[in-house]
Image: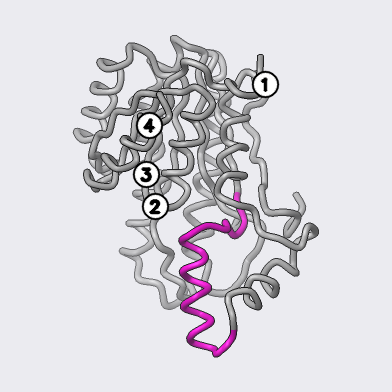
Amino acid sequence: MSAAGLLQDRVVVISGVGPGLGSTLALRCASQGADVVLAARTRERLEKVAAEVEALGRRALPVPTDITDDESVAALAEAATAEYGRIDTLVNNAFSVPSMKPLAGTDFQQIRDSVELTVLGALRLTRSFTSALAETDGSVVNINSMVLRHSQERYGSYKLAKSALLAMSQSLATELGPQGIRVNSVAPGYIWGPTLRGYFEHQAGKYGTSVEQIYEHTAAASDLRRLPTTEEIADTVIFLASSMASAVTGQCIDVNCGEYHH
């Protein structure tokens, strides 16, 4: 199989399609030959990404979805299977901004909301697409985080949710394996793209430094002295979704340019 078509004529469902990794995932999957189903709350954003996918010559189905709502997710699964007749991969990419407070000062409702979106949202989607994925010996890829690998202050709530997501992914790999479904995770470090650049610009203005200096300081902690791009994260997801990873399940691949080893 050529590298140009790792997902040729497959159908990939992507949740959390926003301005960062979600849209890059959609375009990168399309460039590898996939048709995509785009799920997020904002219709306008979905339609914009769908138009970009179609400009690459692949089909896109935008479906406004609240992954914390059973009926909304059921409607997504019904629309996706009705449109394409098959589902090959589900990418759980939904993201919520962490509280960035110590656990002692984090509101319990914030923690509940984070788990509801990150963990139960992914489970809700996976359950809704299980029967379709079983028909194609399909796969699930859950987007996790390098927060799994450290216990820095102010990340407690985020680590709690992402650690639960990893445990759930491993359990689902065991439970769904007999149906031919593979379940894996990708744990990015900092992701260099428009979102992180915007944050670095804010920090540079706040502290009177430059984006380049903040980048170099941040990247200095990694073996490669750089930060992974959104495209590099997406390419790891595509590998896990492809037949090249047909014997890989229950795993978590860290993509952080060597900032953390696992």
Establish if 254 lies above or below 7.
below
Q: Position of residue 40 (x, y in %)?
A: 30, 43
Badge 1 crowding class, 10 Å Cα cut-off, few under 14, some 14 to 19, many 20 or more, is few
Badge 2 crowding class, 10 Å Cα cut-off, few under 14, some 14 to 19, many 20 or more, is some
Q: What type is the residue that disc 3 sits on?
A: Val
- Who's the residue at 43% across and 26% down the image? 12
User: Of the numbered discs in the image, which one, if any, rests on residue 55?
Assistant: 4
- Residue 170 shows up from this direction: no
User: Of the numbered discs in the image, which one, if any, rests on residue 244?
Assistant: 1
The alpha-carbon separation of the residues under discs 1 and 4 comes to 27 Å
Q: Pointers 4 and 3 in contact (CB under 8 A)?
A: no
Badge 3 crowding class, 10 Å Cα cut-off, few under 14, some 14 to 19, many 20 or more, is many
- Who's the residue at 37% across and 39% down the image? 15
Establish if 181 lies above or below 145.
above
Query: Looking at this rendering, what residue extends furthest in the bottom direction?
Result: 208
User: Of the numbered discs in the image, which one, if any, rests on residue 17?
Assistant: 3
Which of disc 3 and disc 4 is earlier in sequence? 3
